[in-house]
Image: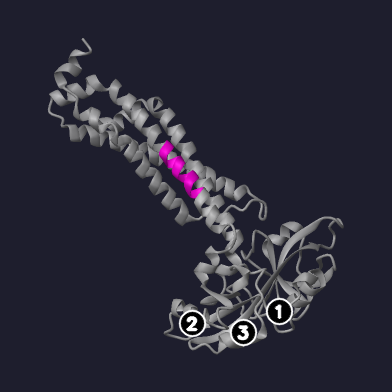
Amino acid sequence: MSLEILELRRRPGRFATATAILTLLAALLMLLGGLLDGLIAGSTAAFRAQRADLVVYSSAAEQSLPRSRVTEATRSAVEAVPGVADTAALGVVQLGARVPGNAPRDLAPVALLGYELAPRGVPAPPADGSAYADRTLEADGVRVGQTLQVGPARSPVRIVGWVDGLTYAGQGTLWTTVDTWRSVTAANRPDAVLGPADSQALLVRAEPGVAPEVLAARIAHVNDGAVDALTLDAAIEAIPGVSEQNSTFGQIIGVTLVIAVVVVALFFALLTIERLPLYGVLKAVGATSGRLFRGVLLQVVIITAIASLIGTSIAVAIDLALPPGSIPFDLRPSRALWNLAFLFLAAVLGGAFSLRRVLRIDPASAIGSTS
């Protein structure tokens, strides 16, 4: 057994402070990552599920679905572009819904989406006046078979089934026919009334062999630039708040990793000073600076591994304890693994600051300092 592991076993209290701080940092990284993924999923899930290559908005809408208006004539022009296999209408209206059994003023915020092309996880459009509800609305008392009264006009929408994980702008969704969406929009948002064959956006699928980026450039010239054609990934990135959330949380996570570097660097710098006489003896009997430094890194990795395990367990426990529909938290293995990899890298970088002091140890002076 190496001296480093023996020290960890016999004197764990010496490393308790660093382990506790790294545990808190690991838990914070997991929580930040889960919150970021939860917020992004809550804003973009309805788009990520779409089976389309492009999303087409009117150019005046500035890539915003609620503000976009695509007329029947524009749709025909888009369908005539070489490389377009088919198109499908999409529209959304965000309203409050009265749920049977809830107080009259206890409204459930919903996003009613009218669709022609069924996204992944959503059946074909139901009968007019009916909708599939996102399961997060269960927390608001919504049940299959109920008829919700949507918007100020109390438009009736009957729930005929569930879909999972398809929120829009952080709200539970109702997936219905385009005709039902138009009628509900007309009744509750007179300022947003569309024509009988108009929609807010078009979902476009490309013919085999046609690159979405190439097709988007072709569609951009329809009616002298009357539309904006975005790839699905670009449309998701253009959803308000997505890029800002990524940037903000990325900065917070970066600062957390910098703190981890500083914590490990300071701790092992102090520990190295305490060990100077020991290192002097080891060097006197033939231990190289590289061997001593590898011992430091071994302890860094073990401490970080223990802290990561505890921190991740805390985040998982919080994830399991949160009721559905409460806080947008989504702890994903991929995000957790990346955060842990960055934490290990930060810890190793922090431990590396001890290298210079280890290299400069002179056995005679180190041993003599104790006499």
Report the disc number at residue 178: 1
Q: Callout 2: 10 Å neighbours few (<14), some, many (20+)?
A: some
Q: Which residue is mark 2?
A: 218
Q: CA distance from mark 2 to mark 1?
A: 26 Å
Q: Is residue 145 visible?
A: no
In the shown orientation, is residue 159 left or right of residue 58? right
Q: Which residue is mark 3?
A: 75
Asked if the magenta segment contains residue 298, the reply would be no
Name the amino acid, label 3. Arg
Q: Callout 3: 10 Å neighbours few (<14), some, many (20+)?
A: many
Counting from the top left corner in percent of width and height, residue 140 is at 75, 58
Name the amino acid, label 2. Arg
Counting from the top left corner in percent of width and height, residue 176 is at 71, 75
Please report contact status of discs 2 and 1: CB closer than 8 Å, yes or no: no
- Please state, as top left, top right, bottom left or bottom right, where the C terminus lies in the image: top left
Residue at (21% x, 24% y) in the render? 279
- For the record, the magenta segment spans 249-259
